[in-house]
Image: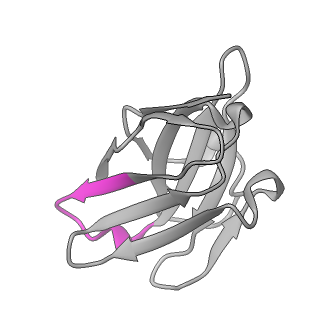
Amino acid sequence: HVQVVESGGGLVQAGESLTVSCAAAGLPLDDYFVAWFRQRLEKEREAVSYTVQRSPITLYADFVKGRFTVSRDKAKNTLYLQMVNLKPEDTAMYYCADRRTNVHSWKDNTTYDSWGQGTQVTVSS
């Protein structure tokens, strides 16, 4: 599996935008199925998006559709999560995770091989 590192989190106000990054070291991130998860305080980790390997296809959780967009920079071996119109309920630690196969539900966080350390996004009201 490929090691990933998240960055770009911070403090923003409601309605503002923020982009977080998932950078991979060594192996091409494009060879993996890559998901963004988030974990809000005292909540279960939940899936945000899922990008299919070697494909422009990305699936999104209903609660972020139309507000979050994933993009990829192959040259930088990095995946980005662009978040607009942020809400206080988007406050969470955001994690990038990858896996080689697509057998299980993309929302099942137990099926991923590698996780980053997370980056904190805080949205004030």
Q: How is the image coloured?
A: one colour
Viewer-nearest residue: 79 or 27: 79
Part of the protein shown in magenta = 21-32
Q: Quadrant of residue 116?
A: top left
Residue shown at 45%/83% (left/top)? 54
Q: Residue furthest right?
A: 62
Find out whether residue 25 is within the magenta segment. yes
Q: Quadrant of residue 68?
A: bottom right
Find out whether residue 103 is within the magenta segment. no
Residue shown at 73%/55% (left/top)? 64
Against 65, residue 15 (above or below) is above
Against 70, residue 84 (above or below) is above
> Measured from the top left, where is residue 34 in percent x and y?
49, 61
> Measured from the top left, where is residue 52 in percent x and y?
56, 74
Q: Is residue 72 left or right of residue 51?
A: left
Q: Residue furthest bottom?
A: 55
Q: Residue furthest top?
A: 42
Residue shown at 55%/56% (left/top)? 35
Q: Is residue 66 left or right of residue 50?
A: right
Q: Is residue 65 left or right of residue 26?
A: right
Inspect this view and state whether residue 1 appears.
no
